[in-house]
Amino acid sequence: MSSSLRRRCVAACVMAALAGALPGCAWLGGDAAPGLAPAAEAFEAPRTQVRYDVELRGAPDDDVAALLEQSLALYRFQDEGAQSVAFLRRRAEQDAELARKILRSRGYYEGKLAFRILRGEKAASGAAPAPAADPFAREPAAPTEAGPAPQAAPQPSPDAPEQVRVRLRVKPGRPFILAEHRFVVVDHGQGAAPVPPDAAALGSPVGRRALAARILGAEQAAVAALRRDGRPFARIEGRRAVADMQAARLEVETILSAGPEQRFGPVRFEGLSQVRADYLLSYLPWREGEPVDADKLAEFQKRLASTNLFSTVVVRLPDGPAPDGAAPVIVAAEEGPPRTVAAELNLSTARGPELAASFAHRNLWGANERLGAELDLGFALQALSVELRKPQFRRAGQELALGASARHESDDAFEQSALTLTAGVQRALDPRLTVGLGGLAEVSAIDDGARQEDAFLLGAPAFARYEGADDLINPTQGWRAELKAAPFAGLVGGRAAPFLAADARGAVYFPLDAGGRTVLAAHGRAAAILSESLGDVPAPRRLYAGGGGSVRGYRERFVGPLDSAGDPIGGRSALELGAELRWRVRGDLGAAAFVDAGSVSTSVFPDFAEGVQLAAGLGARYYSPVGPLRLDVAAPLNPRDADDAFQIYFSIGQAF
């Protein structure tokens, strides 16, 4: 038999043995031998013949140990076992080379990994103790005349996998110190070469252990710095590293290809049909002729995406440098549908079902003018509002808002029919802070249970809003706050009734685990109205508390003073506090537990004459693609005669 044929025979015999067939080679050619399964059945998937534990010793620190456990195949495929001890040994040999690379990346250039595979009693040494005897095990056989019944030693099943132990020993050697990391700039085009950056200033561990991740991070930071400074085609050309094995020192030289200097050229739009290019140019964060800055390109793309006009938008430079140095900027965009129709259903025991429908057009005349209409239908509220918004009004980041609404509202506090006109300007001072100032005119007919009167008001509302939470609908960390203030003047029941209203709200969110699955949230509110008396303030403009977004467990507006009929009269000061623990139980299902407290006083400053209303409750959450669906059940802890035993709320979004 030739050596080649012999090797094929040996390989076939090994596969047959793994598959449980006879260890013969007579079936190599022709038909299967009598009594043997066909060849197609002989090559079944190999069974796991070896189960093993892994023992790691000698890692220089916990980070290296964790990295080895995450990376080595011995750990990653431990649950699957191995086909044989020889197969397991090959796996360990491959891991030894991978471990050497990992140790080098952590500054241990002499590091290596040794291993031993312990079988039999050696594998069992150090294992967990045998389990305690089963109290329900069968009693041993009774002795016979020939003596006690022999106790057969337990024998492992011939089909049971062999249990072995793989002992890994890390020999890290000395940690190498990065003695020097220098940058060399080449291929910089005409003119003077850029000054090579300082590696240590970019985070390279000069004078410390030579961690590869920080060295590479400094290289990427150097490239990013060049791309921010008119060199958009900068890249890493190469790297040279020299290790002094005697002194345990490392020197690194990184070669940067700077590329020719480029300036911002004209902007070219691709894919526009309904959107005006001159409007989009108002979002430019640079002036033509400035040195190209990669960060400004990314900022321009972010601003265009925030308009919600596009399904996709990409801002980029051509593939190569412009010969004259004026790099054109290409904006490839795909416009999205300009219209949106939405509907929302809210349920509560206090107000019953409420349907909210909305329509929005985001591009009326080609410059992102937004027309929105909202319709609210419920037992307590019927309202229609229309709003027109024009972004980039007279300056970047400023928006004009014009609105009109008609509403009829009837609940235990008051009944009102009102027409309201609003106009205002708001400006984003930074991505999180927005301020606004406007005007308001309102005419209404009001019945507060004590009297019926007409009111005509003029107001100048202003606000400042900070949005520091990570999500508008389902925040898990950060905080948000809003301050609103408005002076009012006008006639209420034919008499002059000036007053000043101020309302401050805030919320904070603390993630209790790394994934944000458990969140502790808290909110607060403080509000006041400065006026001669409570009667000078129309009932709809007074301060109230209670309801789904306020103090849950109480009916809408029912926290605070009540009249003789048990209806809320509102107040001139209000305080609210609440805390909620939210956690995802499994998948998209979550739960919540909360406590709320609130107080409303008829005086300008809280006097707590009506006490503090307290409530607690539990909730369920379903985290849908459009936001969390919220179901809350809450009960007052110190109910009054007029308060219900509990309240139920169902809506989209968290309570705060």
Image: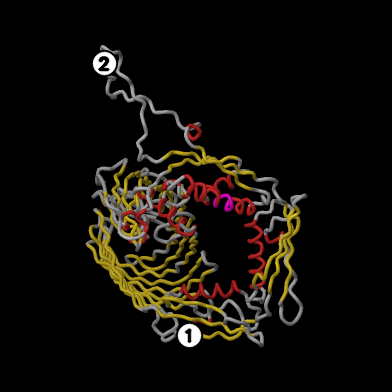
Other residues around mark 2 within 10 Å, as few (<14) / some (14–19) / many (≥20): few
- Mark 2 and mark 1 lie on one chain; the one further toward the N terminus is 2
Q: Amino acid at mark 2?
A: Ala
The quadrant holding residue 154 is: top left
Check residue 142 in the rendering and tell me which mark sits there, or answer none: 2
Question: Magenta stretch: dominant SS?
Answer: helix
Q: Which residues are magenta?
A: 94-98
Q: Residue 111: give its label.
A: none
Q: As displayed, is residue 150 above or below residue 340?
A: above
Q: Position of residue 325 (x, y in %)?
A: 66, 85
- Position in image of residue 393 (x %, y %): 49, 79
The image's colour scheme reads secondary structure
Q: Quadrant of the N terminus?
A: bottom left
Q: Is residue 256 visible?
A: yes
Q: Nearer the viewer, residue 191 or 342?
A: 191
Distance Cα–Cα, label 2 vs label 1: 93 Å
Q: Quadrant of residue 206?
A: bottom right
- Judging by the rendered image, the residue that carries numbered circle 1 is 270
Mark yes or no: residue 539 visible.
no
Name the residue furthest front.
Answer: 1
Residue occupying image coordinates x 23% and y 63%: 378
Q: In the rendered image, which quarter is residue 28 located in?
A: bottom left
Left or right of 655? Residue 124 is right
**x 36%, y 65%: residue:** 495
Point out the image quarter for the C terminus.
Answer: bottom left
Residue 473 higher or lower than 187, as above or below: above
Nearer to us in this view, 322 or 5? 5
Residue at 37% of width from left, 34% of height from top?
Answer: 156
User: Where in the figure is residue 339, as x and y percent of width and height?
Assistant: 34, 78
